[in-house]
Amino acid sequence: MTSTIGKLGALIGLAFVLRAGYGLSRPPVVVGDEQNFDGIGWHLASENRYVMKEGPSAYRLPAYPLFLGGVYKIAGHSLPAARLAQAAAGALLVLVMFWTGKVLFGTEASGWIAAVFTSLYPFFIYYDSQLIAESFIVFWTTITIGLLLRWKKSPRSAGWAALSGLSFCLLCLTKSNFILVFLIFLAIEGAALWRRSPGAVSVKTLVLFMLVFVTPILGWGIRNQRTFGRFFLDSHGGISMLDCVKYYDIHRETRFASVLPQLPAYQAASGLNEAEQDLLYEKEALQFIRENPRLILSRVIPNFVNFWRFYPRQDVTFQDNQRVLTLISLLTEPFLLLAGAAGLWLTRRRWRELYPSYAFILVLMSIHLIMASQMRYRLPLMPIFILFSAYFLENRLWRRA
């Protein structure tokens, strides 16, 4: 036990040093999406208000800005402090992956392999240095999967049910797309309960799980209704749909922000509040989908390729050496994706237990088959592929050696 704690501590320390070192080496400025999160976080810390420049906002879901606000409340408006906090969370992910590996596969070996991969995986290190929600989503995706599967091992445990609901809630208050995974889980577990399947969760724990999940989300939606006159979770979804569906080609050329003010939909939304703008953008995007089904279908294969292709994007100029990034990617991505897929195949007979992992993969991928896609959006799935890569290594290589 002491040896395990010591080794884990060393691995967590290594992960923190790598993340902190890279994060602190970056310029102390925020760009692009970072500006939204950083601005809301600082307003929370300094004024106790959830606002952007224009006033009260729901442009971003609250979980990640609240995290940044907590850091700024303690350290002041310090980007290095925020990056150090994310480095600490990224290092803690090593422990989470070790535990989740043991929960999924029942052996310490799989947990150790997953923990080592997590500590060294370069694109976790890269995104832990950026003040956007990706690394936060990775953290809560992993915890949510681990807690759900741990709860299924003790289906009558109120504690595991409540923790699962809370974790799922925090994840969905970071990226609302994952509410679809919640509904899938609820439907499957509800059906198992109805059929009185062996190992089904109890009515009480399922209700508790739902209440813990739903209550904060309802509270956030009610806040938005009082502020903007409509119940909704965030006003980022409509503009994202318009951006990634109707103006797909402009978005892929990374010119969307520069031409946005000239677009008819944007001009029509001028003067509306966030909720009204979001509704207008969403309706226009859905109308475009209905009127152009063949065009939407023609994008599925390119989007699939973009979602699963290796880092980095070749059509974007990075501050870091592009060749070095490509080399790092080729040393990690092909193996983790292929070995992870092999691990998913090896465990296929356990699908009734492991289906939350499949649900996360299918939901996130399916959304980006319609929306414009890139490998950054795949990042929340990499813990799953790392975990199943660990299983593949343990069962097909080391046990045979």
Image (cartoon, rainbow, N blue to C red):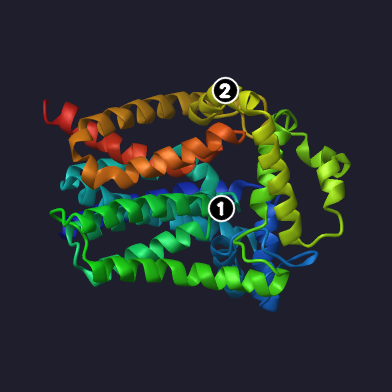
Residue at the disc numbered 2: 302
Along the horizontal axis of the image, is 48 left or right of 273?
Answer: left
Q: Residue furthest bottom?
A: 48
Q: Within 10 angstroms of label 1, few (less than 14), some, or many (20 or more) residues? A: many
**Mark 2: which secondary structure?**
helix
Residue for point 66% across, 41% down: 286
Separation of residues labelled 2 and 1 (CA atoms):
25 Å
Along the horizontal axis of the image, is 321 left or right of 102?
Answer: right
Looking at the rendered image, the quarter that the N terminus falls into is bottom left
With respect to residue 234, does 25 lie above or below?
Answer: above
Disc 2 or disc 1, which is closer to the eye?
A: 2
Which label is found at residue 394?
A: none
The kind of residue on which mark 1 rests is Ala
Residue in front for this viewpoint, 239 or 391 = 239
Which label is found at residue 133?
A: 1
Find residue 71 and report its horizontal and vertical position in percent: 57, 68
Residue in front for this viewpoint, 109 or 320 = 109
Find residue 231 and report its horizontal and vertical position in percent: 62, 66
Looking at the rendered image, the quarter that the C terminus falls into is top left
Residue in front for this viewpoint, 171 or 237 = 237
Find residue 194 and report its horizontal and vertical position in percent: 22, 58
> Considering only order in the chain, which callout, 1 or 2, is on the residue closer to the N terminus?
1
Residue 245 showing in the rendered view: yes
**Mark 1: which secondary structure?**
loop
Find residue 186 and report its horizontal and vertical position in percent: 34, 56
Residue 12 showing in the rendered view: no
Residue 390 found in image quarter: top left
Residue for point 72% across, 69% down: 228
Badge 2 vs badge 1, beta-carbon distance below 8 Å: no
The kind of residue on which mark 2 rests is Pro
Along the horizontal axis of the image, is 46 left or right of 110?
Answer: right
